[in-house]
Image (tube, rainbow, N blue to C red):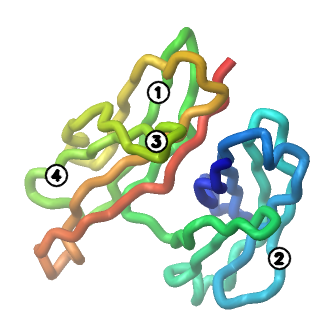
Amino acid sequence: MGEPTSVLPCSTVPKISCGAAVYGAVYAGQKARIYLEGKKTVVAAVTVGSNDIFTASAPLPPYSARARAKYFVKIGNVRSVVLSLARRLILNPAVYANGHVTISGTVVAPLARRPAPVIVHQRLLCGRLVTLARFRPTANGSYTATFPAPDGARAAVFSAYTHVPQSASRKTLIGTRGLAQVVALP
């Protein structure tokens, strides 16, 4: 039996849209509840689909709290990891077409003089990460990569990682991870 992978903010205007994949039909039909960390109230609730994927929308937290906002999902007694709303590595929703998955996004400025490579991983059912690609974004931080879709899977989970300067004035590089993207497969 698997656990919910994560809350996946994809859009922040005027609401936060999120979704996730869960492994195993054990969760199909159950209620996924999304919480803002530190609050005991549910900000969104949705039923997990038969394909182990769910999506939901919730109001954004107040503007002053968005940089620190963190969310998690609960399905029954199982809880996902806590994830931040604000990200320096943005992953657009993954797209499946013609047996391939395309991932695109942006590394948010400030960037290093020579941007660090973006490393794309796929999470397998056993929880292991497989590195699919390693490439440098363009000078403005954008990137696109296409991979063969995994065989025999109903859904795939992709994530990305890179290094960025801590701030415009502090050139020390820090690691940043984009939120995982889930794509339903035929």
As drawn, 25 above or below 161? above
Tell which circle, 2 or 3, labels the residue nearer the N-terminal end.
Answer: 2
What is the secondary structure assignment of the residue under circle 2?
A: strand
> Which residue, given by chain and number where applicable, does mark 1 sit on?
102
| Residues packed near mark 3 inside 10 Å, few (<14), some (14 to 19) or many (20 plus) | some
Tell which circle, 4 or 2, labels the residue nearer the N-terminal end.
Answer: 2
Q: CA distance from mark 1 to mark 2?
A: 32 Å
> Which residue, given by chain and number where applicable, does mark 2 sit on?
42
Label 3 near label 4: C-beta < 8 Å? Answer: no
Q: CA distance from mark 2 to mark 3?
A: 27 Å
What is the secondary structure assignment of the residue under circle 3?
A: strand
| Residues packed near mark 4 inside 10 Å, few (<14), some (14 to 19) or many (20 plus) | many
- Kind of residue at badge 4: Pro
Q: CA distance from mark 4 to mark 3?
A: 25 Å
Residue 62 figure quarter: bottom right
Tell which circle, 3 or 1, labels the residue nearer the N-terminal end.
Answer: 1
Q: Residue at x 32, y 53 (%)?
A: 161
- Kind of residue at badge 2: Val
> Measured from the top left, where is residue 56 in percent x and y?
79, 55
Q: Nearer the viewer, mark 4 or mark 1?
A: 1
Q: Nearer the viewer, mark 4 or mark 2?
A: 2
